[in-house]
Image: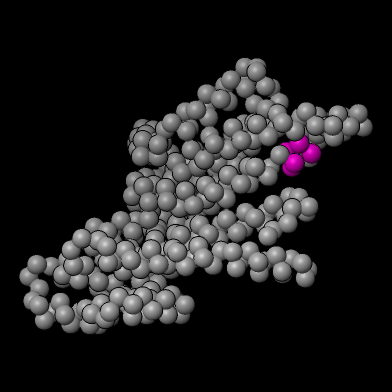
Amino acid sequence: MRNLIISLTKRFLLVMPVIWAVVTMVFLLIHIVPGDPVRNALGDNATAEQVMELKHKLGLDLPLSSQYINYWRGVVKGDLGVSLVNPSDRVLDKILVRYPATLELAIAGLVVALLISIPLGVTAGVNQGRLLDNLASIIALLGISTPGFVLGPLMIYIFAIKLDLLPVSGRYGPEYLILPAVTMGAALAAILTRMVRSSVIEELNEDYVRAARAKGLSERQVIYKHVLKNGLIPVVTIIGLQFGVLLAGAIITEIIFSWPGLGRLTIDAINSRDYPMVQGCILMIALTYIAANLLTDFAYRLLDPRIKVE
């Protein structure tokens, strides 16, 4: 237990520079965009007094160094500022309302990807060079080459309009999650299928597989109890890295399916030039990505205790 706590502390300290860089870049976002964000938010008809009043209220009339320190203080306290469009709306409150929907969609997309990729990748690896392997490779290639903004409308047309089986938009029940989750998970499933296939092929040549077969274990036990477990480490790596991609991809998917998540909030904030809201959304996505990579490191340890998280 003591070693685990030490490992956790070391890993957290290694992540701190990344968090600092992310917060700094998010802070600079409002200062490097062209134009005056306050005037853009108030509109062209706003007077100079109104602009200066809002700048003073938001602390944007202070020196850049003071604004940076204040922003860090706010982040540490959980205060990401207020909306430029509606100053009565706190950025963090708006994000926390939308964040669960995005996290739900990303996790559902990941589950869909795993449900497709593991059996498909195992089947392809066990049947290397045969018809099933070739079919799995074709499916994987189609998944990788079909972007979400193409697959999403196509699935809406087939399953919602033509077959009338699933709802098109909103978040009112589990059935509303199916189409966006499959849209998000398809590309990741294609990548994971190829990874699982390669891992299975590599592990099948190991001595422990021959020993397991010699003991009389069924082929299913050999594959799913031994081969797949030992071959999951590179797959877990891809899952950890791709989870952040799922969060980023949620922006497009949420727009297509009118999913009330963080991605849609980000786009709405960009369209209305609500830069504090954009800052908060990007920061939340980035911190979630960092957390996903931390969890990936510890998943290594669960799969193989010999791996040290340092």
Let me know if residue 71 is in the magenta part: no
Name the residue at 86% across, 29% down: 210
Q: Answer above or below: position of 280 versus 292.
A: below
- Residue 295 appears left or right of 229: left
> Magenta region, mostly helix, strand or loop?
helix
Q: Quadrant of residue 25?
A: bottom left
Q: Position of residue 106 (x, y in %)?
A: 49, 52
Q: Residue at x 27, y 62 (%)?
A: 32
- Count of numbered badges drawn on the protein: 0
Q: Residue at x 20, y 71 (%)?
A: 38
Image quadrant for the N terminus? bottom right
- The answer to whether one can see residue 40 in this image is yes
Asked whether, in this view, residue 205 is left or right of residue 182, the answer is right
Residue 161 in percent (x, y) is at 34, 36
Instruction: Find the residue positioned furthest to the right.
Output: 215
Taking depth in this image into account, of 99 and 27 the one nearest to the observer is 27
Say whether residue 294 is left or right of residue 253: right
The span picked out in magenta is 226-230
Looking at the rendering, in which quadrant would you find the C terminus?
bottom right
Task: Report whether residue 217 is seen.
Answer: no
Q: Is residue 224 above or below residue 92?
A: above
Residue under the image location 63 percent in, 63 percent down: 11
Which quarter of the picture shows residue 159? Answer: top left
Q: Is residue 295 above or below residue 201?
A: below
Which percent across, then down, holds residue 309?
A: 69, 58
| Residue closest to the eye, 185 or 232 | 232
The picture places residue 56, in percent across and down from the top left corner, at 22, 82
Image coloring type: one colour
